[in-house]
Image (cartoon, grey):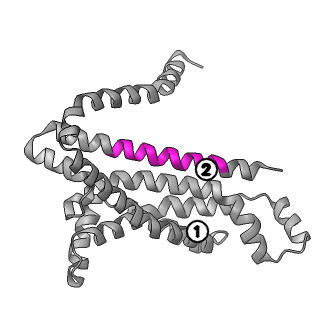
């Protein structure tokens, strides 16, 4: 390995510590602001979590269902992944803005409903892709053994293939959820609340502490959710590797 390669490897290895030190420094710097506005910080954090919870409650079953229905089928799979990929190319602020005229006739052009719908759409690609990958990754000898034991194809799917695919599915959910935490900050633009209010408000007022506080809390929220889902993923991975 070249000297540059070793230097990059060391830099990447130390990156989590650098980020942790940076976050700790920001937390110390912003402590007076966060303490002064602690009630608002809790309210905005709750609003942010509610957006994530509502959207993931629908996005996860929907993405897993689409992935399950299209795995092993080339054309439906290509259509599902192509559509989800196309949605990911739309800038978040544009999609949130597009929800306003689309849902305005229903009286839901702004607020929680359009934000949740946009987050559901953005979350589909990693969930669908990883569900398909997980279902296709189950070893053929395992499936043949299950069939030899007298299981029906339906039983093989639910009792063998689907449980063994869970580490991959959880990985997709993890990616979708962490992405949604960041994208949800834009939901404040259409009146859905959340920590994005501090970011937009701080930019509007030229108030750096408010912007940094919103960004820091969003980052901490994303890390907490990521670590929680990573722990679940490792649990299911150990289950998958059991003889």
Q: Nearer the viewer, mark 1 or mark 2?
A: 2
| Front residue of this view, candidates 94 and 155 | 155
Residue found farthest to the left: 205
Magenta residues span: 218-235
Q: What residue lies at 34% left-to-right and 51% top-to-bottom?
A: 182
**Is the residue 181 above or below the residue 36 in the image?**
below
Q: Nearer the viewer, residue 235 or 123?
A: 235
Image coordinates for residue 114, horizontal then vertical, percent: 29, 70
Q: Quadrant of residue 118?
A: bottom left
Residue underneath mark 2: 233
- The dominant secondary structure in magenta is helix
Where disc 1 sits, the SS reads helix
Nearest to the observer: residue 143 or residue 35: 35
Residue at the disc numbered 1 = 67
Determine whether 243 is above or below 103 in the image: above
Task: Say which label, 1 or 2, has the lower sequence index.
Answer: 1
Residue 224 in the magenta stretch? The answer is yes
Any magenta on residue 181?
A: no
170 sits left or right of 150 in the view? left
């Amino acid at each position: 390995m070249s000297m540059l390669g070793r230097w990059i490897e060391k830099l990447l290895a130390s990156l989590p510590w650098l980020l942790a030190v940076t976050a700790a420094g920001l937390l110390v710097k912003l402590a007076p602001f966060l303490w002064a506005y602690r009630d608002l910080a809790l309210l905005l954090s709750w609003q942010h979590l509610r957006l994530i919870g509502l959207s993931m409650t629908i996005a996860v079953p929907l993405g897993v269902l689409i992935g399950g229905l299209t795995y092993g089928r080339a054309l439906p799979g290509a259509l599902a992944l192509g559509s989800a990929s196309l949605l990911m190319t739309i800038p978040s602020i544009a999609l949130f803005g597009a929800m306003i005229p689309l849902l305005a006739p229903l009286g839901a052009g702004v607020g929680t409903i359009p934000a949740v719908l946009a987050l559901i759409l953005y979350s589909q690609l990693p969930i669908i892709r990883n569900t398909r990958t997980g279902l296709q990754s189950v070893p053929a000898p395992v499936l043949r053994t299950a069939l030899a034991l007298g299981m029906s194809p339906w039983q093989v799917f639910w009792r063998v293939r689907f449980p063994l695919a869970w580490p991959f599915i959880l990985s997709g959910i993890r990616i979708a959820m962490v992405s949604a935490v960041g994208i949800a900050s834009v939901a404040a633009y259409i009146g859905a609340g959340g920590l994005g209010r501090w970011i937009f408000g701080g930019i509007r007022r030229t108030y750096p502490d408010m912007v940094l506080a919103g960004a820091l809390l969003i980052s901490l929220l994303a890390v907490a959710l990521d670590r929680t889902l990573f722990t679940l993923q490792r649990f299911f991975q150990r289950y998958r590797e059991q003889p």
